[in-house]
Image (cartoon, rainbow, N blue to C red):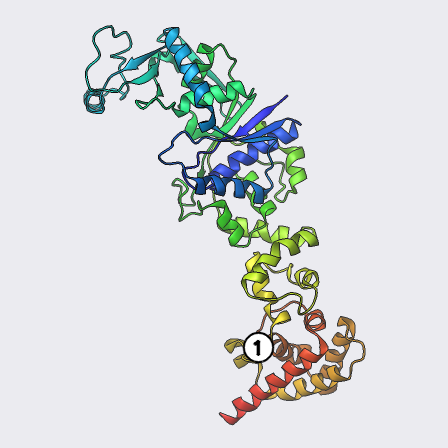
Amino acid sequence: MVKTRFAPSPTGYLHIGGVRTALFSWLYAKQKKGEFTLRIEDTDIERSTQASVKAILDGMEWLGLDYDKGPIYQTERFDRYKAVIQDLMDRDLAYYCYASREELDEMREAQKARGEKPRYDGRFRNFEGTPPEGVKPVIRFKNPEEGEVVIEDLVKGNITVANKELDDLIIARSDGTPTYNLTVVVDDMDMGMTHVIRGDDHINNTPRQINLYKALGAEPPKFAHIPMVLGEDGSRLSKRHGAVSVLQYKEDGFLPEALLNYLVRLGWSYKDQEIFTIQEMIDLFDLESVNASPSTFNLEKLLWINQQHIQTTDLDNLVNNLKPFMGHKGIDTQQGPELSQVADLLRERAKTLIEMADGAVYFYQDFTEFEAGAAKKHLRSVAEEPLRLVQKKFAELTDWKAEKIHEAIHQAAEELEVGMGKVGMPLRVAITGGGQSPSIDATAELIGQQKCVARIDLALQAIEARKANG
């Protein structure tokens, strides 16, 4: 059975790059009917926080990236790591290193001066003397000195590294806590991971980890190193590019499935298709089609994809995602039209749920002022007669439906021998307060007959006031 995992460190928020890694691992497991595990790599006790753990769990939940096992915390497995480290020591595959920080700095500076690659020189690898006083040793793994490591990478192809290029990595810090390279190997070995899908910033660790697997008598998993996501200026993704907490995208009004759709296209493609449902992603995803080159984050493309999903997602799903944004604006959706009707009307234009909530306000709340630009352009004396006629026809309607409302507006335009725009635009400003809305007849139907008549009154008062002021 295929087994994959997502293993974030809780030392900060869950960001776009991490989510894409989680998504690719999740999709691969789902596509192969395998098992997906969430593992929290919290051995960096000084930097790990409970707030970061919560952000990871909340982010995964919002995105719908459900896991079959987990969350598993590395801090609960210290005894296991300790036993593995002791086993390596007992078999002379690891050793105490007493080099101080100053000693290591001097060593690296000397190597740089000679034009060499800075690396640990193995000075305590076969040490048999008296340990220096006052130095708490780290424990290093004895990396093989001969031969080479071949990474059969499913994205980048085969990568060969000579063992002489690798130094003896630290597997336990001076305080006895295990390091990332040790814990990740033990965990993936114990949990039977078949595929490790992760960012290519880990690729330098991979040959060292493969040697650790072999030392522990385990078959390494298959590796797929995904190229990083870059900002539009070609630099590493940062906050200014959009590398914020994934939950910020929730607050900014993105649908989770739209964000996942955008992320799956950062480095993976299927023919010319741009918009995918979650099920389509599961059915079509494969590692062979992941691009080996870095991807570029583009907020405009994300907004476009979000707009497509707002237009096509199940209406109940749209309403459930929209409700919190209506609440943020202090709008009681029980007092007014059904939110599902309003959402269905607004979904064609809105790029985000925030935009949709902004556009929904006038359906639920009356206003006392009109948008200045729209009022200046459309609430002029020339609009007075059309508005009065439409108001009269609206008041007389016995069937308040969009079709009848449209007929009333059309009749007013015909009777006055003017174009529909001369009636429709002032009417739009009158009943919505601004110059933008969906079709005016459907909008008026949801606002309601009584409110529309009253709002036209308000617009006529505004025209009168404007005339009085010259």
Q: Is residue 59 above or below residue 120?
A: below
Q: Position of residue 104 (x, y in %)?
A: 23, 22
Q: Is 391 or 407 nearer to us in this picture? A: 391
Residue 276, quarter of picture: top right
Q: For the N terminus, which image quadrant?
A: top right
Residue 325 percent across, percent down from the top left: 57, 59
The residue shown at (32%, 12%) is 95
Instruction: Please report the residue visible at 41 percent of the width from the left and 25 percent of the height from the top.
Output: 180
SS at circle 1: loop
The answer to whether residue 265 is visible is no
Up/down of 205 relative to 232, above or below: above
Q: Look at 78% across and 81% down and name the residue there.
A: 397
Residue positioned 46% across, 45% down in the render: 245
Q: Which residue position holds label 1?
A: 367
Kind of residue indicated by mark 1? Phe
Left or right side of 72 for 107? left
Q: Residue 178 or 34: which is nearer the viewer?
A: 178
> Can residue 293 be seen at all in this image of the molecule?
yes
Q: Residues within 10 Å of mark 1 (few under 14, many from 20)?
A: few
Horizontal side of residue 201 vs 311, given as left or right:
left
Left or right placement of residue 379 versus residue 108 in this view: right
What is the x, y in percent for residue 44?
38, 31
Q: Nearer the viewer, residue 357 or 11?
A: 11
Q: Above or below — where is 344 with respect to 161?
A: below
Measured as percent of width and height from the top left, residue 377 is found at: 54, 79
